Amino acid sequence: MLFNSLSFVVFLIIILALYYSKLFNWTGKKRMLLFASYIFYGLWNPPLVILLWISTIVDWITGKKLAIEENKRKRILWLMLSMFVNLGFLGFFKYRDFLLDNFTTVLNTYGYGYQSTQMDIILPMGISFYTFQTMSYTIDMYLKRTERAKTFLDFALYVTFFPQLVAGPIVRAQDLITQFYEEKRATVNQFIWGFFLLTLGIFQKVVMADTLLSDTVDKVYSSDKILNFWDAWMGTLAFSGQIFFDFAGYSTCAIGIALMLGIILPDNFKYPYASLGFSDLWKRWHITLSSWLRDYLYIPLGGNRYGVVRMYSALMITMLLGGLWHGAAWTFIVWGGLHGTYLILERLQRQYIPFKITKWNGIFLAFTTFTCINITWVFFRAREFKTAWNLISSMFYFNPNGEKVLGSFDILKVGIIIGLLFLCHWFMRNTSVKAVSKKISPIALAVVWAVMLFLVTIAQGSGEQFIYFQF
Amino acid sequence: MDLKKTFIVTAILSIVAIGIWEYFWRSKGVYPTLDDNEALWAMQRYRVEKAPSYNMLLMGSSRVLFDIQLDEWEAEIGIRPIQLASVGSSPLPIFHDVVANTSFTGTIIVGVTPGLFFSTTSPDAQPWQWPQSKVDYYKKRTYAQISNHLLSLPLQKNLAFISDDQGIDGIKLKELVGKINIGNRVVDPMPPFHEFGEIAEDRNLKMKQITVTDTAYANSVIKVWQFFMKGAASGPPPDKNSTIDFFLNDLKVFEARGGQVILIRCPSSGSLRAGENMGIPRAAFWDDLVKQANVPSYHFEDYDNLKGLICPEESHLSAEDAQYFTTELVKIMKNDNTLINLKSNKHAL
């Protein structure tokens, strides 16, 4: 079920009515939320709920064993079981065809003439998110960093909680399970603020991403021609806006819906396009994934504890795998590799050409970072390397006579939206929507909110899927 | 922070703004209509799964949608056919889907619009892609999509501003923004296109009266057909052999399990008909198809009471003429014993 759909409106109203009714005690409400979460997921593809159940049961049993088992070897075996099941699901459903394709290519390079059979396996929605979330629980249990979930119901709800089930934020056990132990009710202010965030998220998705930017992106990235400088840049800038509004929109919706239930979810985006460098970017973009990768991949790989070479290797491996997490294609790996390279170059710069960031050079640095991010988005969005190279060469002015596919208004529209987006991120980088809303009058906030609601209504989103669902 | 006050003001402002928006579009002559989208098509396709053998399916392009009126068909024969035709489409992907993926053994009426039927079997070409996307949608639709569609129907039926129309008639935000044009950096060669039909929940489609009464409106649609004809003249030639072979393969399977196929050629007129005669002449295409298929077939030009019909925009009949055409066509079929009249043959049920 999509947040930007009529079914979800009905679903949410029913859930809220049941949640705030006196029909259930707290355990009953949690059961209702769990059942609703399975409905939320199952309305897309009922049989794939079984994967959720398997993942939940395996990690619940693993967590239970790890809580009491002291034998090191057995602890590792329990952890391996959890990793095998979760990564096995990911490997089979997400990476099987990619691995098989590459295996076939390698064999055929050596003249074996091997033919593989594509299975066209359906990718379970949000599998990358919920498997990472449940793995964080078992890894934390193994490392004794978190307490075992008190009941199976609490744990199952942690794995399946519908607001963040299919596209995050990826929440750690200690941050969410503990919230289920005591009855939660949103205060009136929390409830209304949650609804405001839900509106903001839907506005970002339906109006900004789908209505104003997606067509420009599609025109540029579906073109098989060598494009003009302006078209290549505007298509890519439009994508930078589209993916931000799409994904940040989803996270904002998730946070808002959870808040309406009295549950607090962590921030996932903090004005990333005003990042001062790439370390800063990953503290602002998809924060819950980057902190997951840091804690469960980069640090176990050695982090910065074993010298420069090991640190840079760990950094690069983390980013390459981070790229692969987003999609089973070499373009995503290149995207991750570029970010790894940026992070390494940034650390070298800090070591050899350090400079102080002031308010004067800050915006220039943010703009440079944003420009470099856009180069990486080309590989993220392009389905083939040929398209990516064509666009990159056009963006670096190698094709001054390239084809024009965008009208002047498209160029102006993207320029204004992305310009405002960048400035908005710059001015908001050290504050939050909540802090700003407290500074303005309730009427002004109401006008902004009403404008968003009105635009969402007249945009009549056709229920286009969120981009990150495919990851 | 007084969020209660904010919420109340937001609710009032939003309701007022949406009310004004609805009033504005109604004052411009826009009224509530349904979208002829994949979800609406899929609801009819679902009916095929349980359709008894005395049922009838309609397939083809927009000509079958406009020209065959379900009320008149039902009045003549006693059964309301399932409308599966799709605008701008070859009937072959949908015919193939029904033959390959259902056990339907009734009658299928296949409309032959020469420029589309004989166009291609390439999955990437528009006449194939459009109907195939409907078939794929049906196969993959989720329960969430079904409930979204069912929930959207009352809104579409009651609110004028809820409309998925595209291009010049589009009123959703994306379409309104898309109409803004500055300069001529990129020129869209296609003339503006009006949505000149209105569809019902069972996909019975009627031509809007403005197409009949407003010549300028009808001419703007004719310009689009001329644009497509020019494109077809400079594009690849019709792929007659592949399309006929594809059809005959499915026909063989369908007939083997007891199904019946009837081919119909709906009217076209004016310069469009002249263009069809030049590019896809009847003798070489329609007649050859009929000969090879060896099924009952009805060409509008073969009947005195049908051949004089004039299409306001050269390709489709007005609602009134479509009612006449349907009634007369079914009468002819009944006379030929091509269709079983369920009204007079209750035992057939």
Image (cartoon, coloured by chain):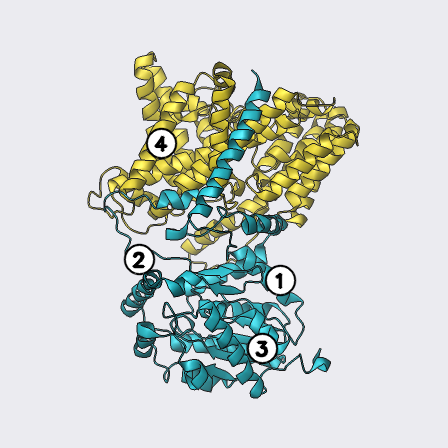
Chain colours: A yellow, B cyan
Please report, as a chain letter, where disc 3 is located.
B
Q: Amino acid at mark 1?
A: Tyr
Q: State the image quarter where residue A216 is shown.
A: top left
Q: Verify CB contact (< 8 Å) between mark 3 and mark 4.
A: no
Circle number at residue B254: 3
Q: Choose mark 4 or mark 2, whichever is in front.
A: 2
Q: Verify CB contact (< 8 Å) between mark 4 and mark 2.
A: no
Circle number at residue B46: 1
Q: Earlier in the sequence, mark 2 or mark 1?
A: 1
| Outermost residue, left side | A401
Element marked by disc 2? loop
Q: Verify CB contact (< 8 Å) between mark 1 and mark 3.
A: no
Please report, as a chain letter, where disc 4 is located.
A
Circle number at residue B191: 2
Q: State the separation of the CA atoms marked 3 and 4.
A: 55 Å
A146 left or right of B13? right
Element marked by disc 4? helix
- Vertical order, A210 against B258 (above or below): above
Please report, as a chain letter, where disc 1 is located.
B
Along the viewing direction, whichever of A458 and B75 lies nearer the viewer: B75
Number of residues whose C-alpha sits closer than 10 Å to that of mark 3, classed few (under 14), some (14–19) or many (20 or more):
many
